[in-house]
Image: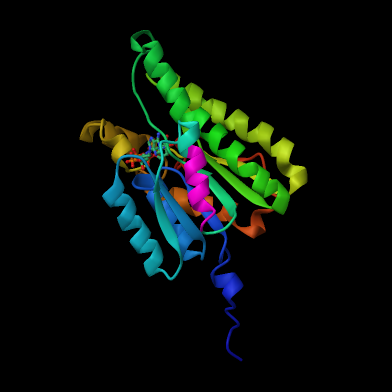
Amino acid sequence: MPADFSFSTTRPLFGQVAVVTGASRGIGRSIAIALARAGAYVVVNYFHSRDAANEVVQICRDSGTKAIAVKADVTLPQDVEFLFQKANELGTPAILVNNAGIASAKLLLDTSLEEWESLIKSNLTASFLCAKTVLPQMISNRYGRVINISSIWGLAGGSYEVAYSASKGGLIAFTKALAKEVGPSGITVNAVAPGAIETDMLNALTADDKQVLEEQTPVGRIGLPEDVAHAVLFLASPSASFMTGQVISPNGGLVI
Ligand code: NAP
């Protein structure tokens, strides 16, 4: 008898609306494509990179699902409101991936108040705004998956990255506290804390810096966006219903 590859197992997220912030490039792009291939209807949020976002939408649609690109600066409440209004044109969101973020490598003593506030806004406040906007719908559906993209530096602290580490550590505490608050409503909230991943965010590193990172990483390589997308896909799936308030860290063993 042929194997029964039913739709629900090959496309476990079929028809679920997923909002991925910062999905025009890098890790967010890979997450959006992975969710689309699992059947989700994907909202590809972007800020500056419109052409790149449209390309991600096309790749998602080519996998046989629905996708739209929505421009929104997720640090601004009115833009976040607009993002979820557009998302609702596809249906009520079941999955939110708070991925948009910025990085800055500086000594604390060289970090201005403006730079500090900008990192906290992009990497922490944006997740607060997106979660706050979508949660009433998830609560009334008694189902939701919120996945926050943190960083190993949010776990271990990175020197020259005090502000970035603080924003990502805050995101982990946000994840754990919110998981307790909304678990009874059928919503899980988890964090993914990647190690060094090959994206534009690593452009500031020299080839020598990257070689050192590879040597320090037990599996001997820098990660790929797909390494993060696999973890997100698992947490987004219905089968991860007993996972909440957790931090999964695809980092090749750099931080154990
Ligand atoms: P990236 O290649 O620099 O891409 C950043 C993405 O975020 C872009 O799509 C950008 O959109 C979007 N974005 C930034 N600010 C935004 C805003 N205010 N509103 C909407 N979108 C915004 O970065 P990445 O490496 O993929 O990083 C993605 C996430 O993973 C970040 O949260 C980062 O901190 C985290 N992370 C990265 C690494 C790494 O090594 N790469 C490691 C650990 C954690 P536009 O281009 O359209 O402006």
Residue 115 seen: yes
Q: Main secondary structure of the magenta part?
A: helix
Q: Which residues are magenta?
A: 80-89
Say whether residue 179 is left or right of residue 226: right
Question: Is residue 31 visible in the rendered structure shown here?
Answer: no
Q: Residue at x 45, y 64 (%)?
A: 66
Q: Is residue 246 left or right of residue 230?
A: right
| Most foreground residue, 163 or 253 | 163
Measuring 49% from the left and 54% from the top, which residue is drawn there? 230
Q: Give how far across and how far down residue 196 sits, in percent.
A: 38, 38
> Is residue 159 depicted above or below 40 in this figure?
above
Residue 160, image x, y percentages: 37, 18
In the displayed structure image, the side of residue 114 where residue 82 appears, left or right: right
| Residue situated furthest right in the rendering | 184
Residue 148 drawn at (x, y percent): 54, 40
Q: Does residue 96 sit above or below 34 in this rendering?
A: above
158 left or right of 106 in image? right
Q: Residue at x 35, y 47 (%)?
A: 24
Q: Residue furthest top?
A: 109
Please state the quadrant of the image where ligand 1 appears: top left
Up/down of 113 relative to 192, above or below: above
Q: How is the image coloured?
A: rainbow
**Quadrant location of residue 219?**
top left
In which quadrant will I find the N terminus? Answer: bottom right
Residue 117 shown in magenta: no
User: Within the image, what quadrant is residue 32 found in?
Assistant: bottom left
Front residue of 41/160: it is 41
Q: Position of residue 100 (x, y in %)?
A: 43, 38
Q: Residue furthest bottom?
A: 1
